[in-house]
Amino acid sequence: MTSKPKVGISLYSYGWDIKTGKMTVKDAIDNAASLNVDGIELVDKQHIPNYPHASVYDLIELRDYIESYGLKVSCYSTYIDDLMRTDQRATPEECTRMLLDDIAEAKVLGTKIIRPAMAQVNIKWLPLVKTVMTNVLPTLKKNDIKQALEIHAPLPPKAILEFVKGMKDDYIGLCPDFSAWQMNKQPGMTDLSDKSITETVASFSEMNPIELLEECMPYTIHVHAKAHAFKNGKEVTIPYDKLIPIISKSGYSGYISTEFEGWMMDEVDSREIAKTHVELVRRYL
């Protein structure tokens, strides 16, 4: 019998309440655990104590707190800050050192997946990414940690898929983010009539057809179930009813990590949003 995907949650979803001081990172972990998820994803800048100078003690304490609920860190989402200086971008060697530090932190956190992203959201950085990935590959294998290259709007899924195929190594895989298949129009969270939702569905981008996700699944090691807005328990900008079944039927047994981004546009109740989002993913599995 084929295993089903595991449902996880990114603490990024609690961004509004963490940013405004209404919740701590541990409060967010408490709430995520109450939703009976299988794993918790961390984002370096938002959730790691004393970042970018995290101590091993800080990382162990955070890992142990998550594991006290019987959960694991599903993924460590990091950023290669290649725009730290104003005079030039970071060199491949500097990017490599940053990623090696991230891999070491991922090892302490106990996760098997790391998702590094770069400031340049552009396929033009793929040659640099290839150099950096090649440099860190021996360290990934030594620590049994896989690296997921994210397919995220506005990056074309096909280009990222072909890049990962070209790497020809199981330790380099994909993290499809649902933003790549979102609809062109993003309505707000309130005052949405059924007609407006129907019109939004009709405007779904033809540039990234649903079938592309099927092509990506054999190379997928993590999934970001992005969301921007909900109405009556449904995400109004992304076709979850089509994307989740593709993942479920593919034989993928990794994490689908819910990742709500709408808090960047409007004040939200993070706890209610997290509950709605997790329930939505489970509805279509």
Image (spheres, rainbow, N blue to C red):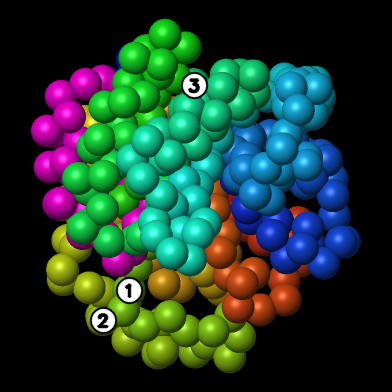
Dot 1 falls on a residue whose secondary structure is: loop
For badge 3, the amino acid type reads Lys
Task: Identify the image quadrant of the N terminus.
Answer: top left
Q: Label 1 belongs to which residue? A: 183
Relative placement, left or right, of 103 versus 222 is right
Relative placement, left or right, of 238 versus 260 is left
Q: Label 2 belongs to which residue? A: 203
Q: Residue placed at 17% from the left, 61% from the top?
A: 209
- Relative image position of residue 140 (x, y in whole percent): 40, 18
Q: Which mark is residue 280?
A: none
Which residue extends farthest right? Answer: 22
Q: Looking at the picture, does residue 151 appear above or below residue 209?
A: above
Magenta residues, start to end: 152-178
User: What is the number of callouts on the image?
Assistant: 3
Task: Answer with mark 3 or mark 1, whichever residue precedes in sequence.
Answer: 3
Depth check, front residue: 233 or 103: 103
Residue 178 seen in this snapshot = no
